[in-house]
Amino acid sequence: KVAKAYNDGKHGYRANNTNMLADTRVTRIQRIENMNLWQSYAAKLNSMKVRAKKETPEPDSSKYEQMYYFHGTAPHLVYELEYQQGFNRSFAGKNACFYGRGCYFARDSAYSIDYSGLMPGGVEKKGPYQMLACRVAVGEFCQGVKDAIVPAVRLEETKTLYDSTVK
């Protein structure tokens, strides 16, 4: 029942109102909850909003909204740890660092499917594959640079970095 609603494009499966692959269907949905990670996320989101109010009289709050983006992942123990400990930039680089070291998320599921791991018992090119739909606080962003270790400096006087990089 829930998978049908997602296949019909309801409940945000098509993150940010983008199209999903025509031959893609959701076969299982699992919500992953971790109170410690949620509290860390909420604190970071709040700190970005507070910083924005200090820097700009009327900040564009849409930059700090909780957006859903996709992350292709493989179904093995390392990623089970990811669910419990969060995304870790120090593991970045497995699939290249075209826009710098970090955890990559895509607006379109069609992009992330290329980085998704085949589930046990699956058939190559047919699936099923595993993909995460993640809440991401993007914040202030800049163009990513190949192999960069951190985002560029946003405010020179305080050496404040951008929160994220984009393609």
Image (cartoon, rainbow, N blue to C red):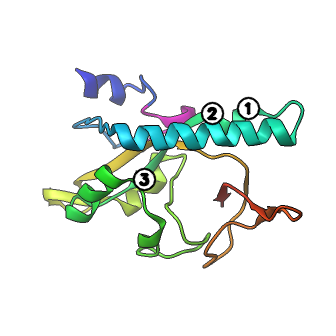
Residue 63 can be seen, yes or no? no
Q: Percent from the top left, x then y, of residue 79?
A: 28, 59
* Residue depicted at x 44% and y 55%: 112
Residue at mark 2: 65
Instruction: Tell which of 112 and 147 is nearer to you.
Output: 147
Q: Earlier in the sequence, mark 2 or mark 3?
A: 2
Q: Is residue 15 magenta?
A: yes
Q: Is residue 128 left or right of residue 57?
A: left
Query: Which quarter of the rendering shows the C terminus?
Result: bottom right
Q: Nearer the viewer, residue 9 or 12?
A: 12
Q: Amino acid at mark 2?
A: Glu
Residue that numbered label 3 is attached to: 71
Labels 2 and 1 touching (C-beta < 8 A)? yes
Q: Amino acid at mark 1?
A: Ser
Question: Which residue is drawn at the image coordinates 42% and 23% (left, top)?
Answer: 11
Q: What residue sits 50% from the left and 42% below the top? A: 41
Q: CA distance from mark 2 to mark 1?
A: 7 Å
Residue identified by numbered label 1: 61
Q: Which residues are magenta?
A: 13-21
Image position, residue 132 (x, y; %): 37, 47
